[in-house]
Structure formats: C-alpha cells, structure tokens
Amino acid sequence: MTGFSADWLALREPFDLRARNPRVLDAVVAAFAGTQQLRIVDLACGTGSTLRALAPRLPAAQNWRLTDNDLSLLARASGMTRPTGVTVTTTPIDLNHDLEAALDGPVDLVTTSALLDLVSEPWLDRLAVESLARHIPLYAALSYDGRVEMKPSHKLDAAIVAAVNKHQRGDKGFGPALGPQAASAAIARFKSLGCAVGHGTSDWTGGPEDREFQMAIFAGWASAARETGDMTLGDTIEWLTFRRDQVAAGRSSLRVGHVDIFVRPTATR
Ligand SMILES: C[S@@+](CC[C@H](N)C(=O)[O-])C[C@H]1O[C@@H](n2cnc3c(N)ncnc32)[C@H](O)[C@@H]1O
C-alpha cells in the first residue's frame, strides 16, 4: 500500500471516521444550521471520505466540488453512493500550483482531511489568504501531530517515531512539509489573522483486533524511517519484527495523534 493508494484510504477511513473530533464536527454542522443550500469544495478528496463523514450531518441540498490530482482516486470519488440531495463534481487539479483556481466560484465551506501535514508553510499561508479574502470557513480534519503511543513498548520506539516525524517534514509536493507542526501552525496562523478557530484531537486508536491497520502503519513507518537514513537496517528489522509479532499475537495497541480544526473568518458570508 502506498501513501495515497485507494486500498490504504479505504483501510484508514473507518479509523478516521471514529477519530474525527465530535465537538469540531458539531461546530461545523451548527455553523450551517438553517442554510438551504451549501456549496463545498473538498481539497485533496481522495475517494471522498470527508463527504461521506460530513454530508449526512449537513442540510440536505449540497453541491460538493471534489478536487485531487490523482485521477484514479477522483474516479472512485465520482462513482460513490451519496445521500439524496447531494450533487458531486470532480476537478482534477494540482493544488500546489492551482489552489486559488480550486476555490474560484461561489463556495460556502472548504473542507479537507489528512492534507495539512503534507503542505508547506507558504502553501498554508496561501490557503489562509484565499479563504479569508473570500470569507470561506475551513474544516481541516485529521492532521497528524507527531504523538504516538504503542503498546507493548520497545526500546527502538522513540528512534522510529523521531525518524518518522523527520520524514513527515520532507517535501510531499508542496515544498518542505509542516508534518507534525501542521495543526499548531494552522491554528496559530488563522488566530493571528483574527479568525475564530475551534480545534480538538482526533487520534487514531487501534486495538488488538485491528491487525491489518496496525500492520500497514508499522510497515509504512519502517520504510519511512529507513528513507531518512537515521535507522540502521538491523534496528529497523528488529523493531518491525517485534511489532508484527505483537500484532499477530493480538497483543498490540496503538494511538496516533491527529488534530481537527474549524476556522471561521470573523465576517462569514
Ligand atoms: C492522505 S490522502 C487524504 C485523502 C482524503 N482527504 C482522505 O482523508 O481520505 C492525501 C490526498 O492528497 C492528494 N494530493 C497530494 N498531493 C496533491 C496535489 N499536489 N494536488 C492535489 N491533490 C494532492 C492525494 O492524491 C490524496 O488523495
């Protein structure tokens, strides 16, 4: 499974759904109570998980413009079952180059999930400028924040997490990524611009029964850690073997820190 493969997005979606911060979600829903028709742009939609999470809670008449640069994911998003009253258009777009174009036209809400940790500080600034200049609220869910708890523990856990967090700050197509700093940077930036910013944790939790999910995460982390050059092959193998054995034996549990935010410009339209 690669970072954005449809298989990985499908595997993580139930964990994302369970993790989404209910208070932040309630604030999004409350902001649009009584609205007759909503026009939403979802940035980096993948197969459409944010629509599936949010649409059932919003007023019935919704138009979603789903954007991503992966045509295969967009095709899946376009074909998904959607609630009555919800219309969907898909827009293939490179959000690094064309964020501004993605937000053109009438938009009531911008959404995204698992994107902010991939972007750079200058890109975050562009998002802030564009959403504020257009007075559009932003719901950005599931930004990884660097907190990890694994049980049972292993002596190499801290080294692996440090390497993963370093890898997270590499360039993911938007310049040097904010990685684990993304949510705190976004909260600080939007607050400094006078926005109302609600936020809360949305941690993934995996229990002993969540074998496939944990196996995929640990494999991804081992390979990310190796790519940094900070872990020896021997240490990486030792750590991954231990983790896989614990998962296979039904003894492994995992928490991965994420943060959700909901930003409201002071004068929303
Ligand atoms: C971690 S996935 C999250 C997908 C979806 N939001 C979700 O939560 O399931 C990141 C998404 O960003 C998209 N992406 C990455 N770089 C992009 C770019 N430069 N322009 C548009 N989309 C991009 C990927 O194709 C992928 O769908």
Image (cartoon, rainbow, N blue to C red):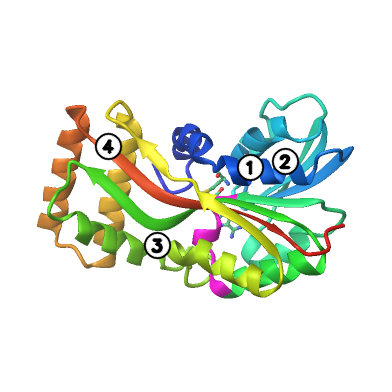
Give x and y (percent) for residue 266.
Answer: 78, 64
The residue at which mark 1 appears reads as: 25
Residue 249 visible at all:
yes
Give x and y (percent) for residue 76.
Answer: 62, 34
The residue at which mark 4 appears reads as: 253
Per the model, the C-alpha gap separating discs 4 and 3 is: 22 Å
User: Depth check: 96 or 34 in front?
Assistant: 34
Q: Which residue is drawn at 14% across and 58% down?
A: 233
Among numbered discs 3 and 1, the one appearing first in the sequence: 1
Q: Splitting the image into 4 quarters, where does residue 71 fall?
A: top right
Q: Residue at x 81, y 30 (%)?
A: 60
Among numbered discs 4 and 1, the one appearing first in the sequence: 1
Q: What residue type is labelled 1?
A: Leu
Per the model, the C-alpha gap separating discs 3 and 1 is: 26 Å
Contact (Cβ within 8 Å) of mark 2 with mark 1: yes
Give the magenta-colored segment's residue range: 113-121
Per the model, the C-alpha gap separating discs 3 and 2 is: 31 Å
The relative height of residue 110 versus residue 183 in the rendered view (above or below) is above
Q: What element carries label 4?
A: strand
Q: Which residue is drawn at 67% across and 50% down?
A: 111
Label 1: few (<14), some (14–19) or many (≥20) C-alpha neighbours in 10 Å = many
Residue 47 visible at all:
no
Contact (Cβ within 8 Å) of mark 4 with mark 3: no
The residue at which mark 2 appears reads as: 29
Contact (Cβ within 8 Å) of mark 3 with mark 1: no
